Image (cartoon, rainbow, N blue to C red):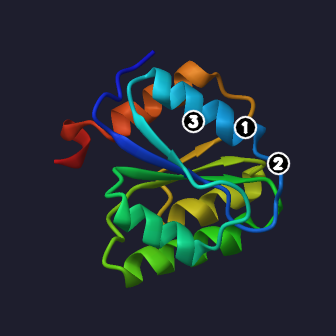
């Protein structure tokens, strides 16, 4: 697996969705790749997620979305991050994201969309690439 050593990545479950197996699997894969993972648990508000991201000084935020309200929850989370002067924190999403909604999420500022069809190694490698110093420059 790719190296995420020294990276702090938060995995969050916004909204009312109560299914978190996928989020926990991603959290373990990121941990195994060397990241320090902060998992916020189920049913968190975008405001809570943004505050924790800032308080924990994370390098990225991952939103696990299965409820169908991904467009609204992503937009609200991005607004909350910007309100806390943290709009530069990369946000990625995973879960049940219909193909027709992906462009809207990218336009909202999401840096990556990961679905259940993807291999864990590929997800981790893509995150490592996006969080590398070369990408930040």
How packed mark 3 is, by other alpha carbons closer than 10 Å (few <14, some 14-19, many 20 or more), is many
Tell which residue pokes out farthest to the bottom in this image. Answer: 83
Front residue of 54/102: it is 54
Residue ID for mark 3: 27
- Disc 2 + disc 1, Cβ < 8 Å: yes
Q: Position of residue 17 (x, y in %)?
A: 82, 59
**Local secondary structure at mark 3:** helix
Q: Is residue 69 left or right of residue 38?
A: right
* Residue 99 vertical placement versus 34 (above, below): below
For marks 2 and 3, the one nearer the N-term is 2
Residue 19 got which mark? 2
Q: Position of residue 18 (x, y in %)?
A: 83, 55
Residue 22 got which mark? 1
How packed mark 1 is, by other alpha carbons closer than 10 Å (few <14, some 14-19, many 20 or more), is some
What residue do we see at 54% from left, 23% from top?
122
* Residue 130 vertical placement versus 32 (above, below): below
Q: Position of residue 114 (x, y in %)?
A: 62, 40
How packed mark 2 is, by other alpha carbons closer than 10 Å (few <14, some 14-19, many 20 or more), is some
- Disc 3 + disc 1, Cβ < 8 Å: no
**Local secondary structure at mark 1:** helix
**Local secondary structure at mark 2:** loop
How far is mark 3 from mark 1, CA to CA?
9 Å
- Disc 2 + disc 3, Cβ < 8 Å: no
How far is mark 2 from mark 3, CA to CA?
14 Å
For marks 3 and 1, the one nearer the N-term is 1
Tell which residue pokes out farthest to the top in this image. Answer: 1
């Amino acid at each position: 697996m790719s190296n995420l050593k020294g990276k702090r990545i938060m995995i969050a479950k916004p909204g009312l969705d109560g299914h978190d197996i996928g989020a926990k699997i991603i959290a373990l894969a990121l941990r195994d790749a060397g990241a320090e993972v902060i998992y916020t648990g189920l049913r968190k508000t975008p405001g809570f997620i943004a505050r924790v991201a800032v308080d924990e000084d994370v390098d990225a935020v991952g939103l696990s979305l299965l409820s169908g309200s991904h467009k609204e929850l992503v937009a609200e989370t991005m607004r909350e991050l910007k309100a806390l002067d943290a709009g530069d924190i990369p946000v990625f999403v995973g879960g049940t994201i219909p193909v027709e909604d992906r462009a809207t999420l990218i336009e909202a500022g999401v840096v990556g969309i990961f679905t259940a069809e993807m291999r864990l190694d590929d997800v981790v490698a893509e995150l490592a690439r996006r969080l590398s110093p070369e990408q930040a420059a």
